[in-house]
Image (cartoon, rainbow, N blue to C red):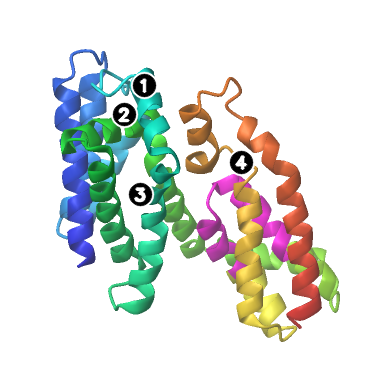
Amino acid sequence: MLEYIYQTTGLLLLAFSLQTFLDKDNPKRVGTGLFWLIYGVTFIFGATIPNWVTGLMVLALTALAAGGFMGVGNYKTTNEEERQKTASVLKNKLFIPAAIVPVGTVAISQFTSLGALVGLGIASIASIIVALVMTKSQPIHSLNEGRRLIDSIGWAAILSQFLAALGYLFNQAGVGDTVAQIVKMMIPENMLLVNVIAYCAGMMIFTVVMGNAFAAFAVITTGIGIPLLVLENGGNAAIIGVLGMLSGYCGTLMTPMAANFNIVPAALLELKNKHHVILMQVIPGLIILAFNIFVMYSFAF
Protein backbone atom coordinates (compact mmCIF):
# COMPACT_ATOMS: atom_id res chain seq x y z
CA MET A 1 0.00 0.00 0.00
CA LEU A 2 2.80 2.41 0.87
CA GLU A 3 4.33 1.91 -2.56
CA TYR A 4 1.09 3.13 -4.14
CA ILE A 5 1.30 6.30 -2.05
CA TYR A 6 4.85 6.89 -3.28
CA GLN A 7 3.78 6.28 -6.87
CA THR A 8 0.86 8.70 -6.54
CA THR A 9 3.25 11.32 -5.22
CA GLY A 10 5.57 10.65 -8.14
CA LEU A 11 2.72 11.05 -10.65
CA LEU A 12 1.85 14.41 -9.10
CA LEU A 13 5.45 15.53 -9.48
CA LEU A 14 5.45 14.39 -13.10
CA ALA A 15 2.33 16.51 -13.67
CA PHE A 16 4.15 19.50 -12.16
CA SER A 17 7.07 18.75 -14.45
CA LEU A 18 4.92 18.62 -17.58
CA GLN A 19 3.19 21.87 -16.66
CA THR A 20 6.56 23.51 -16.11
CA PHE A 21 7.95 22.41 -19.47
CA LEU A 22 4.89 24.00 -21.13
CA ASP A 23 5.10 27.20 -19.08
CA LYS A 24 6.66 29.75 -21.43
CA ASP A 25 6.53 32.41 -18.70
CA ASN A 26 9.14 30.52 -16.68
CA PRO A 27 12.58 31.53 -17.98
CA LYS A 28 14.07 28.45 -16.31
CA ARG A 29 11.35 26.00 -17.25
CA VAL A 30 13.77 23.36 -18.57
CA GLY A 31 15.81 23.17 -15.35
CA THR A 32 12.74 23.35 -13.10
CA GLY A 33 10.89 20.76 -15.17
CA LEU A 34 13.86 18.40 -15.11
CA PHE A 35 14.17 18.77 -11.34
CA TRP A 36 10.57 17.72 -10.66
CA LEU A 37 10.75 15.05 -13.38
CA ILE A 38 13.79 13.37 -11.82
CA TYR A 39 12.36 13.70 -8.34
CA GLY A 40 9.07 12.16 -9.47
CA VAL A 41 10.83 9.22 -11.11
CA THR A 42 12.58 8.41 -7.80
CA PHE A 43 9.16 8.07 -6.15
CA ILE A 44 7.62 5.96 -8.89
CA PHE A 45 10.51 3.60 -9.63
CA GLY A 46 12.63 3.96 -6.48
CA ALA A 47 12.01 0.37 -5.41
CA THR A 48 13.14 -1.10 -8.73
CA ILE A 49 15.94 1.06 -10.14
CA PRO A 50 19.54 0.25 -9.06
CA ASN A 51 20.98 2.21 -6.16
CA TRP A 52 23.77 3.68 -8.29
CA VAL A 53 21.18 5.10 -10.69
CA THR A 54 19.36 6.71 -7.79
CA GLY A 55 22.68 8.16 -6.67
CA LEU A 56 23.25 9.71 -10.09
CA MET A 57 19.74 11.17 -10.00
CA VAL A 58 20.44 12.73 -6.62
CA LEU A 59 23.61 14.29 -8.01
CA ALA A 60 21.59 15.64 -10.94
CA LEU A 61 19.08 17.21 -8.54
CA THR A 62 21.94 18.80 -6.62
CA ALA A 63 23.47 20.20 -9.81
CA LEU A 64 20.16 21.69 -10.96
CA ALA A 65 19.51 23.32 -7.57
CA ALA A 66 23.06 24.54 -6.94
CA GLY A 67 23.48 25.79 -10.52
CA GLY A 68 20.52 28.15 -10.25
CA PHE A 69 18.53 26.36 -12.96
CA MET A 70 15.21 26.58 -11.10
CA GLY A 71 12.70 29.43 -11.37
CA VAL A 72 9.03 30.37 -11.17
CA GLY A 73 6.46 30.93 -13.89
CA ASN A 74 2.78 31.55 -14.52
CA TYR A 75 0.47 29.29 -12.54
CA LYS A 76 -2.95 30.49 -13.77
CA THR A 77 -4.26 30.73 -10.22
CA THR A 78 -6.77 33.09 -8.68
CA ASN A 79 -5.65 36.63 -7.89
CA GLU A 80 -5.50 38.18 -4.45
CA GLU A 81 -8.94 39.79 -4.76
CA GLU A 82 -10.58 36.49 -5.69
CA ARG A 83 -8.88 34.69 -2.80
CA GLN A 84 -10.01 37.36 -0.33
CA LYS A 85 -13.57 37.09 -1.61
CA THR A 86 -13.62 33.31 -1.23
CA ALA A 87 -12.05 33.53 2.24
CA SER A 88 -14.70 36.02 3.38
CA VAL A 89 -17.42 33.55 2.39
CA LEU A 90 -15.88 30.34 3.77
CA LYS A 91 -14.23 31.96 6.84
CA ASN A 92 -13.10 29.33 9.37
CA LYS A 93 -14.40 26.49 7.19
CA LEU A 94 -11.10 26.87 5.34
CA PHE A 95 -9.42 25.07 8.24
CA ILE A 96 -11.47 21.89 7.71
CA PRO A 97 -9.31 20.48 4.87
CA ALA A 98 -6.16 21.34 6.81
CA ALA A 99 -7.49 19.58 9.93
CA ILE A 100 -8.40 16.46 7.96
CA VAL A 101 -4.73 15.70 7.28
CA PRO A 102 -3.46 15.29 10.89
CA VAL A 103 -6.74 13.90 12.25
CA GLY A 104 -7.06 11.41 9.41
CA THR A 105 -3.41 10.36 9.67
CA VAL A 106 -3.68 9.66 13.40
CA ALA A 107 -7.02 7.86 13.05
CA ILE A 108 -5.82 5.58 10.23
CA SER A 109 -2.53 4.78 11.95
CA GLN A 110 -4.22 4.03 15.28
CA PHE A 111 -7.31 2.09 14.18
CA THR A 112 -5.98 0.25 11.12
CA SER A 113 -2.84 -1.67 10.22
CA LEU A 114 -1.95 0.62 7.33
CA GLY A 115 0.60 2.75 9.21
CA ALA A 116 1.19 6.48 9.57
CA LEU A 117 2.67 7.14 6.11
CA VAL A 118 -0.19 5.43 4.32
CA GLY A 119 -2.59 7.27 6.60
CA LEU A 120 -0.95 10.56 5.67
CA GLY A 121 -1.38 9.81 1.97
CA ILE A 122 -5.03 8.81 2.30
CA ALA A 123 -5.82 11.78 4.55
CA SER A 124 -4.14 14.15 2.11
CA ILE A 125 -6.24 12.85 -0.79
CA ALA A 126 -9.40 13.17 1.32
CA SER A 127 -8.40 16.71 2.25
CA ILE A 128 -8.01 17.70 -1.41
CA ILE A 129 -11.44 16.26 -2.28
CA VAL A 130 -13.11 18.12 0.60
CA ALA A 131 -11.36 21.35 -0.36
CA LEU A 132 -12.51 21.04 -3.99
CA VAL A 133 -16.10 20.41 -2.89
CA MET A 134 -16.09 23.31 -0.42
CA THR A 135 -14.58 25.82 -2.83
CA LYS A 136 -16.41 24.44 -5.90
CA SER A 137 -13.11 24.41 -7.76
CA GLN A 138 -11.85 22.19 -10.55
CA PRO A 139 -9.08 19.60 -9.95
CA ILE A 140 -6.81 21.59 -12.29
CA HIS A 141 -6.96 24.47 -9.81
CA SER A 142 -5.51 22.22 -7.12
CA LEU A 143 -2.77 21.15 -9.51
CA ASN A 144 -1.93 24.74 -10.41
CA GLU A 145 -1.80 25.83 -6.77
CA GLY A 146 0.30 22.81 -5.89
CA ARG A 147 2.84 23.70 -8.54
CA ARG A 148 2.91 27.31 -7.40
CA LEU A 149 3.60 26.30 -3.82
CA ILE A 150 6.24 23.70 -4.62
CA ASP A 151 8.03 26.13 -6.96
CA SER A 152 7.96 28.73 -4.17
CA ILE A 153 9.61 26.19 -1.87
CA GLY A 154 11.99 25.03 -4.61
CA TRP A 155 14.82 22.61 -3.86
CA ALA A 156 14.17 22.95 -0.11
CA ALA A 157 11.19 20.62 -0.56
CA ILE A 158 13.57 17.65 -0.58
CA LEU A 159 16.00 18.90 2.05
CA SER A 160 14.59 16.74 4.84
CA GLN A 161 15.25 13.57 2.82
CA PHE A 162 18.81 14.65 2.07
CA LEU A 163 19.49 15.39 5.73
CA ALA A 164 17.97 12.11 6.92
CA ALA A 165 20.25 10.25 4.52
CA LEU A 166 23.19 12.27 5.78
CA GLY A 167 22.41 11.27 9.35
CA TYR A 168 22.36 7.60 8.35
CA LEU A 169 25.74 7.97 6.64
CA PHE A 170 27.19 9.72 9.70
CA ASN A 171 25.99 6.91 11.93
CA GLN A 172 27.36 4.24 9.59
CA ALA A 173 30.70 6.08 9.52
CA GLY A 174 30.97 5.82 13.32
CA VAL A 175 30.43 9.48 14.14
CA GLY A 176 28.35 8.44 17.15
CA ASP A 177 31.23 6.41 18.61
CA THR A 178 33.59 9.34 18.07
CA VAL A 179 31.18 11.69 19.84
CA ALA A 180 30.95 9.26 22.78
CA GLN A 181 34.75 9.12 23.13
CA ILE A 182 35.03 12.91 23.08
CA VAL A 183 32.31 13.30 25.70
CA LYS A 184 33.92 10.70 27.97
CA MET A 185 37.24 12.52 27.72
CA MET A 186 35.69 15.88 28.60
CA ILE A 187 33.24 14.84 31.33
CA PRO A 188 34.39 13.25 34.62
CA GLU A 189 32.66 10.06 35.75
CA ASN A 190 29.64 10.10 38.07
CA MET A 191 28.43 13.52 36.88
CA LEU A 192 24.93 12.61 35.75
CA LEU A 193 23.66 16.17 35.33
CA VAL A 194 26.55 17.06 33.03
CA ASN A 195 25.87 13.95 30.94
CA VAL A 196 22.21 14.93 30.64
CA ILE A 197 23.17 18.46 29.58
CA ALA A 198 25.66 17.06 27.07
CA TYR A 199 23.01 14.80 25.55
CA CYS A 200 20.24 17.40 25.29
CA ALA A 201 22.54 20.21 24.19
CA GLY A 202 24.28 17.83 21.78
CA MET A 203 20.94 16.95 20.20
CA MET A 204 20.13 20.63 19.80
CA ILE A 205 23.53 21.62 18.38
CA PHE A 206 23.78 18.69 15.99
CA THR A 207 20.26 19.44 14.73
CA VAL A 208 21.28 23.06 14.14
CA VAL A 209 24.17 21.79 12.02
CA MET A 210 22.23 19.12 10.13
CA GLY A 211 18.78 20.70 10.12
CA ASN A 212 17.05 17.45 10.99
CA ALA A 213 16.40 16.07 14.47
CA PHE A 214 15.98 12.53 13.14
CA ALA A 215 19.46 12.63 11.64
CA ALA A 216 20.91 14.02 14.87
CA PHE A 217 19.06 11.44 16.96
CA ALA A 218 20.79 8.52 15.27
CA VAL A 219 24.22 9.99 15.98
CA ILE A 220 23.87 11.59 19.42
CA THR A 221 21.71 8.88 20.97
CA THR A 222 24.15 6.22 19.76
CA GLY A 223 27.08 8.20 21.09
CA ILE A 224 25.75 9.66 24.35
CA GLY A 225 22.17 8.65 25.13
CA ILE A 226 22.49 4.86 25.10
CA PRO A 227 26.04 4.31 26.46
CA LEU A 228 26.22 7.11 29.04
CA LEU A 229 22.63 7.62 30.16
CA VAL A 230 20.86 4.29 29.63
CA LEU A 231 23.61 1.69 30.13
CA GLU A 232 25.98 3.47 32.49
CA ASN A 233 23.41 5.29 34.64
CA GLY A 234 20.38 3.01 34.21
CA GLY A 235 18.13 5.68 32.76
CA ASN A 236 14.63 5.10 31.40
CA ALA A 237 15.19 4.69 27.67
CA ALA A 238 11.67 5.86 26.72
CA ILE A 239 11.90 9.13 28.67
CA ILE A 240 15.45 9.79 27.49
CA GLY A 241 14.54 9.11 23.87
CA VAL A 242 11.44 11.30 23.85
CA LEU A 243 13.10 14.24 25.60
CA GLY A 244 16.21 13.81 23.47
CA MET A 245 14.18 14.09 20.29
CA LEU A 246 12.34 17.11 21.70
CA SER A 247 15.72 18.70 22.43
CA GLY A 248 16.60 18.12 18.79
CA TYR A 249 13.46 19.98 17.79
CA CYS A 250 14.74 22.92 19.83
CA GLY A 251 17.61 23.04 17.37
CA THR A 252 15.15 22.82 14.48
CA LEU A 253 13.66 26.10 15.65
CA MET A 254 17.03 27.83 15.39
CA THR A 255 18.54 26.81 12.07
CA PRO A 256 18.10 27.79 8.43
CA MET A 257 19.11 24.21 7.59
CA ALA A 258 15.56 23.24 8.61
CA ALA A 259 14.39 25.10 5.54
CA ASN A 260 10.97 23.43 5.39
CA PHE A 261 10.20 24.80 8.88
CA ASN A 262 11.96 28.17 8.91
CA ILE A 263 12.88 29.41 5.44
CA VAL A 264 9.90 28.13 3.45
CA PRO A 265 7.27 29.83 5.68
CA ALA A 266 9.20 33.09 5.45
CA ALA A 267 9.21 32.78 1.66
CA LEU A 268 5.52 31.91 1.45
CA LEU A 269 4.62 34.81 3.75
CA GLU A 270 6.94 37.10 1.74
CA LEU A 271 8.73 38.34 4.85
CA LYS A 272 11.44 40.92 4.24
CA ASN A 273 13.89 39.11 6.56
CA LYS A 274 14.08 35.46 5.57
CA HIS A 275 15.49 34.62 9.02
CA HIS A 276 12.70 36.38 10.93
CA VAL A 277 11.01 33.09 11.84
CA ILE A 278 14.25 31.79 13.36
CA LEU A 279 14.86 34.98 15.37
CA MET A 280 11.41 34.69 16.92
CA GLN A 281 11.99 31.06 17.92
CA VAL A 282 15.44 31.18 19.56
CA ILE A 283 14.31 32.13 23.08
CA PRO A 284 11.36 29.65 23.17
CA GLY A 285 13.74 26.97 21.91
CA LEU A 286 16.25 27.60 24.70
CA ILE A 287 13.46 27.60 27.31
CA ILE A 288 12.19 24.23 26.08
CA LEU A 289 15.75 22.86 26.11
CA ALA A 290 16.18 23.89 29.78
CA PHE A 291 12.84 22.26 30.60
CA ASN A 292 13.91 19.03 28.88
CA ILE A 293 17.15 18.91 30.87
CA PHE A 294 15.26 19.42 34.15
CA VAL A 295 12.63 16.76 33.43
CA MET A 296 15.14 14.21 32.16
CA TYR A 297 17.44 14.64 35.17
CA SER A 298 14.52 14.57 37.63
CA PHE A 299 12.43 11.67 36.29
CA ALA A 300 14.49 9.46 33.96
CA PHE A 301 16.85 8.03 36.63
The CA span between labels 2 and 1 is 18 Å
Q: Nearer the viewer, mark 1 or mark 3?
A: 3
Which of the two labelled residues, at mark 1 and mark 4, occupies the earlier sequence position? 1
In the rendered view of the protein, which quadrant contains the N terminus?
A: bottom left
- Amino acid type at image mark 1: Gly
Instruction: State left or right for residue 59 relative to residue 33.
Output: right
Q: Residue at point 37% right, 56% down?
A: 101
Q: Position of residue 249 (x, y in %)?
A: 61, 55
- Amino acid type at image mark 2: Arg
| Residue highlighted by disc 4 | 255
> Between residues 140 and 3, which one lies in front from this camera angle?
140
Give the magenta range: 199-221
Q: Nearer the viewer, mark 4 or mark 2?
A: 2
Q: Quadrant of residue 176?
A: bottom right
Q: Secondary structure at mark 3?
A: helix
Q: Nearer the viewer, mark 3 or mark 2?
A: 3
The CA span between labels 1 and 4 is 22 Å
| Residue 148: mark | 2
Which of the two labelled residues, at mark 3 and mark 2, occupies the earlier sequence position? 3
